Image (cartoon, rainbow, N blue to C red):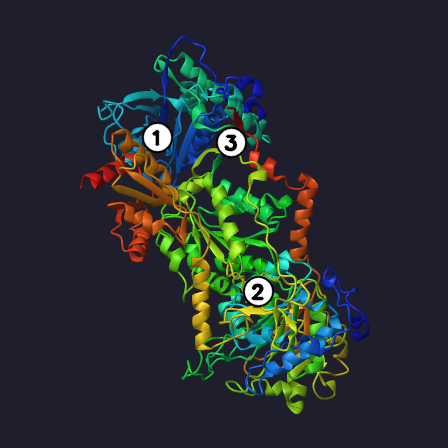
């Protein structure tokens, strides 16, 4: 989907076909609420907020039909800053609340904003079930690999051995890889991006918005107070060359200076491995297929990243496949029931089949 | 099963309301005003089905009735053991009755375990029908009978009918080419046929039911029907059963109308569907399966043609979360659960209090704490419903008093939720949920109008003269905030669990604002319009008031009747609204020298009454998983009167 077709409106986007369009052209300003943004100066959340506010006009949706639902944590203050409908709910439960909203109101574009603690720790159950159901939700998971709002404890994505306030001798927990988790939970759309790369972030948001069903977007986000520089290796131009694998559907998976490195399938194990591209192996370089029916390769790609150093971190859309959408099917069942039984007749329901009459 | 519906022509005398099937022989027929039957057997013996069928026959005949199913939490407890006994008690009468009865007049015991588990409830003189085929040495030893109770004189004083139910059933089905084991499975239908003969029940309904239930296995349907008929015929021919009984329809007990039999959970489900229709809002149920509430999820999921959405969530928290999300979107939202589920939902209920969105929380109470007694009844979630949240988080509480009342209570809970924009607790219990009684089917146009107005435009003029929308600007009468649903242009707003500024709804940590908001939320709930408490003080002489709530209504009223029949003066009142209490409650309590509060807990309502009204309310408590017995309550009340 190119930007040109997107800005034409939403008519071509199946996921948003029931959402009314804006009557007038929108600008970023239309999506800024009157509330003062209260994240710490320098927080990565500012960049994500600006990217989302900047991207929304592209969708051209009536903003009263857009809802942001969040849980608890720094990132979950997000809805207050969007001039749409919004709910700042309780810790971990945003996917459940958004599921109720999206499954009862197909004319809404529903977004969930969550963090690594909110989505993966206290709310892990709701996240995996939203993904497997494929409700029409767009989940933005801000991953800063730390607990910020409670002032600096390790999170379920923190690296092993991390020294924090609650782990003075180092964290013992093996971290989650959110992308691997999502693919394992039957997600139909999984992507990863980085707060500071506005262009990449916007392109991922665009693809997520167009996806029918649940889209999970992991956004690496810097917490400059409690975990500053956590993603520096992916942001520093020099280091990023070797650390970041940019995935684009239909393109060979190569990275590094002069695209000198690539990903091939190890014929012995079936796993993926990184090689220096040569004339001999060039034909074996994997071409990224985000739409592959099987999640196997997407999962293998997600495992290339080293959880400690973040070397070989794939970003972009790892997986995007069509699957029946929960809310559509739920609505279809109502229609089918009416078709089969006729519209509900309360008097007939209350009477049932076994009655008797008492006359005066 | 339209054959059971009485035609108008049959009812010219105003009394005949069903088709009695009379025995054709010349045996003696006695007339009774009421009977209590208990069917008891192994979990796998089909006692609940047998009881349900006898209930349907009885309902279609026009008796008043009340039922008490009682079954173990295990789906199939070890066969022949005491924990595996499942029973179904039915009380039916030619006048209006209030309870499933204290003590059975007839016990049907399908095995030694069923006899042993139930005999203590059966008074001497009662009839006991036992399936002698199951009284093997081994089966008796399993439940601790050293000698057969059928022979050792321990049942002297009872009228025992030893019947080889299994053998007779197998004999009756010999043409069906079933194994002895399979044929024996129909023994519950044989027993049902025998009891149907004893009490002149109509039989067409059961035959039609069996045909429908086993539509895909016509052989099995025919075998069950054959066993059912054989049971009837056995009654007619055997000399052991010399007498049959008539219990006339309770025509005088019932106001004019069309009736059906209904259980509490079914009535509650219908109440929710009706509330959605009356509010003109789509009904949304977010729920997680839990005994004894799952029936509501099952029932509502059948009615998608009413626009009802049912969402079986991944857990209790997601169940209420989805419901709250749907409420934000403008649905009439419901979550159904039992006590352990309420514990998990507490934080979300607090959020709903803060968001001030309508939400029904249906708690079908069961024995607690923790997993407790999943299939038994209790009323011990009252204080959890009242206070089980962090912070000051008042929630209205409504409790139905009978299975039938679950319908009206659901509508009342919905009225309060949508009018005041608040979560509301509907506290039913296992006894109401599974018990059943006749219900006068309401006319749909008699149901209350619950329509609400969503916010449509700005409601406030800002200092600079612009028209703005304030999500927490309240209705001065109800203190309800506007319900502004997504999709409404110009009303975009953000709500959340953080304290909000009065009016604007923006985040506010201001101390004075928090105090104002806490007090305002409380004032909103305290100000809910609820009807005054009515007191039944027949002769105006009573010094003692008995005050109950919820499912104790039947036993309390039956006990009060007994006392009055014995010449005692006693006043009775029953609370449907537990929060807020009716305005006149304090005055009512002070009118009486003594107040007794029977509850199936350790005194939760009494605690509230004592705290709020400084009255010396006395508790009478029972927490054995079963409803009160009228006799036991009458005795306790008599002692309180005499004390």
Q: Residue A95 carries which label?
A: 2
Q: Give the crowd class for mark 2: few <14, some 14-19, many >=20 residues within 10 Å.
A: many
Evaluate whether residue B116 shows in this view. yes
Quarter of the C terminus of chain B within the rendering = top left
Nearest the eye: A354 or B401: B401
In the picture, residue B240 is in which quadrant?
Answer: top left
Q: Position of residue B584 (x, y in %)?
A: 37, 50
Of all residues shown, which one is farthest toward the left?
A: B643
Q: Give the crowd class for mark 3: few <14, some 14-19, many >=20 residues within 10 Å.
A: many
Q: Which residue is drawn at 37% across and 28% down?
A: B37
Q: Do the residues labelled 2 and 3 touch (CB within 8 Å)?
A: no
Residue B513 in the image: above or below residue B85: below
Q: Residue B557 carries which label?
A: none
Q: Which residue is drawn at 43% across and 9% down?
A: B25
Circle 3 chain: B
Q: Position of residue B175 (x, y in %)?
A: 52, 19
Q: Give the crowd class for mark 1: few <14, some 14-19, many >=20 residues within 10 Å.
A: many
Find the distance from the CA under tag 1 to the CA under tag 3: 33 Å
Find the distance from the CA under tag 1 to the CA under tag 2: 51 Å
Q: In this view, does B626 lie to the left or right of B441?
A: left
Residue with the mark numbered 1: B111
Circle 2 chain: A
**Disc 2, SS:** helix
Circle 1 or circle 2, nearest the eye: 2
Residue B430 in the image: above or below residue A239: above
Residue with the mark numbered 3: B260
């Amino acid at each position: 989907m190119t930007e040109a077709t997107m800005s034409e409106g939403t008519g071509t986007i199946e996921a948003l076909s029931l959402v009314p369009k804006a009557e007038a052209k929108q600008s970023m300003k239309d999506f800024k609420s009157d509330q003062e943004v209260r994240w710490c100066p320098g927080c990565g959340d500012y960049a994500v907020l600006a990217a989302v506010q900047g991207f929304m006009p592209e969708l051209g949706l009536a903003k009263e039909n857009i809802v942001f639902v969040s849980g608890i944590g720094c990132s979950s203050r997000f809805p207050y800053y969007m001039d749409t409908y919004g709910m700042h709910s309780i810790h971990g439960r945003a996917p459940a609340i958004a599921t109720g909203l999206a499954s009862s109101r197909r004319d809404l574009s529903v977004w969930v904003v969550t963090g690594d603690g909110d989505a993966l720790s206290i709310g892990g159950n709701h996240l995996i079930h939203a993904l497997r159901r494929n409700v029409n939700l767009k989940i933005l998971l801000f991953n800063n690999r730390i607990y910020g709002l409670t002032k600096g404890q390790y999170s379920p994505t923190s690296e092993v051995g991390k020294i924090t306030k609650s782990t003075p001798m180092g964290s013992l927990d093996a971290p989650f890889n959110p992308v691997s988790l999502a693919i394992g939970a039957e997600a139909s759309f999984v992507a990863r991006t980085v707060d500071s790369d506005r262009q990449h972030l916007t392109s991922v948001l665009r693809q997520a918005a167009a996806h029918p069903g649940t889209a999970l977007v992991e956004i690496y986000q810097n917490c400059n107070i409690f975990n500053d520089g956590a993603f520096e290796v992916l942001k520093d131009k020099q280091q990023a060359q070797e650390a970041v694998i940019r995935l684009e559907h239909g393109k060979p998976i190569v990275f590094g200076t002069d695209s000198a490195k690539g990903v091939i399938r190890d014929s012995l194990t079936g796993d993926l491995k990184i090689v220096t591209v040569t004339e001999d192996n060039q034909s074996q370089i994997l071409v990224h297929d985000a739409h592959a029916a099987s999640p196997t390769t997407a999962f293998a790609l997600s495992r290339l990243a080293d959880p400690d150093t973040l070397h070989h971190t794939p970003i972009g859309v790892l997986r995007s496949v069509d699957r029946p959408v929960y809310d559509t099917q739920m609505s279809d069942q109502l229609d089918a029931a009416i078709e089969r039984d006729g519209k509900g007749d309360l008097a007939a329901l209350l009477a049932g089949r076994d009655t008797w009459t008492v006359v005066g | 099963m339209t054959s059971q519906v009485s035609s108008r022509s049959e009812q010219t005398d105003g009394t005949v309301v069903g088709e009695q099937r009379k025995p054709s022989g010349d045996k003696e027929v006695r007339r009774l005003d009421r009977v209590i039957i208990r069917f008891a057997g192994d979990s796998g013996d089909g006692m609940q089905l047998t009881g349900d069928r006898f209930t349907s026959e009885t309902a279609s005949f026009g008796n008043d009735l009340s039922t008490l199913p009682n079954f173990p939490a295990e789906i199939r407890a070890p066969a022949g053991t005491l924990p595996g006994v499942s029973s179904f008690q039915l009380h039916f009468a030619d006048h209006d009755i209030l309870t499933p009865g204290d003590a059975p007049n007839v016990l049907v015991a399908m095995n030694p375990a069923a006899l042993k588990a139930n005999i203590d409830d059966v008074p001497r003189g009662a009839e006991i029908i036992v399936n002698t085929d199951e009284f093997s040495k081994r089966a008796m030893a399993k439940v601790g009978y050293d000698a057969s109770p059928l022979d050792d004189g321990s049942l002297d004083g009872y009228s025992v009918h030893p019947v080889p139910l299994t053998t007779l059933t197998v004999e009756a089905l010999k043409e069906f080419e079933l194994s002895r084991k399979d044929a024996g499975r129909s023994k519950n239908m044989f027993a049902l046929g025998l009891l149907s003969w004893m009490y002149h029940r109509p039989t067409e309904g059961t035959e039609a039911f069996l045909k429908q239930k086993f539509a895909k296995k016509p052989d099995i349907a025919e075998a069950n029907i054959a066993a059912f008929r054989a049971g009837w015929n056995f009654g007619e021919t055997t000399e052991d059963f010399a007498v049959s009984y008539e219990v006339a329809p309770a025509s005088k007990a019932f106001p004019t109308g069309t009736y059906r039999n209904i259980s509490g959970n079914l009535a509650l489900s219908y109440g929710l569907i009706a509330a959605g229709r009356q509010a003109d809002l789509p009904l949304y149920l977010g729920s997680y399966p839990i005994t004894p509430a799952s029936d509501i999820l099952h029932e509502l999921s059948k009615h998608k043609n009413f626009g009802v959405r049912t969402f079986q969530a991944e857990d209790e928290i997601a169940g209420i979360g989805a419901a709250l999300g749907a409420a934000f979107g403008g649905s009439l939202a419901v979550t159904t659960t039992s006590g352990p589920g309420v514990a998990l939902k507490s934080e979300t209920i607090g959020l709903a209090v803060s968001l001030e969105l309508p939400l029904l929380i249906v708690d079908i109470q069961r024995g607690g704490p923790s997993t407790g007694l999943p299939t038994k009844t209790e009323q011990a979630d009252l204080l959890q419903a009242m206070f089980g949240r962090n912070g000051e988080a008042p929630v209205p509480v409504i409790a139905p008093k009978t299975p039938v009342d679950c319908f009206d209570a659901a509508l009342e809970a919905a009225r309060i939720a949508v009018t005041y924009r608040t979560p509301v607790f509907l506290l039913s219990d296992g006894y109401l949920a599974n018990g059943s009684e006749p219900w006068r089917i309401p006319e749909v146009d008699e149901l209350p109008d619950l329509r609400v107005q969503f916010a449509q435009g700005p409601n406030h003029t800002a200092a600079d003269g612009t028209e703005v929308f304030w999500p927490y600007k309240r209705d001065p009468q109800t203190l309800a905030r506007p319900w502004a649903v997504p999709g409404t242009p110009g009303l975009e707003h953000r709500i959340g669990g953080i304290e909000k500024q009065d009016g604007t709804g923006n985040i506010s940590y201001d101390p004075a604002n928090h105090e104002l908001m806490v007090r305002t939320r409380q004032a909103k709930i305290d100000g809910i319009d609820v009807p005054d408490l009515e007191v039944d003080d027949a002769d105006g002489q009573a010094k003692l008031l008995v005050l109950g709530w919820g499912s104790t209504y039947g036993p309390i009223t039956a006990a009060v009747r007994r006392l009055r029949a014995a010449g005692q003066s006693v006043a009775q009142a029953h609370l449907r609204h537990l929060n807020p209490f009716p305005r006149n409650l304090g005055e009512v309590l002070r009118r009486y020298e003594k107040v007794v509060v029977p509850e199936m807990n350790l005194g939760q309502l009494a605690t509230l009454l004592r705290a709020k009204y400084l009255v010396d309310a006395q508790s009478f408590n029972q927490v054995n998983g079963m409803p009160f017995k009228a006799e036991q309550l009458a005795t306790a009340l008599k002692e309180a009167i005499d004390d």
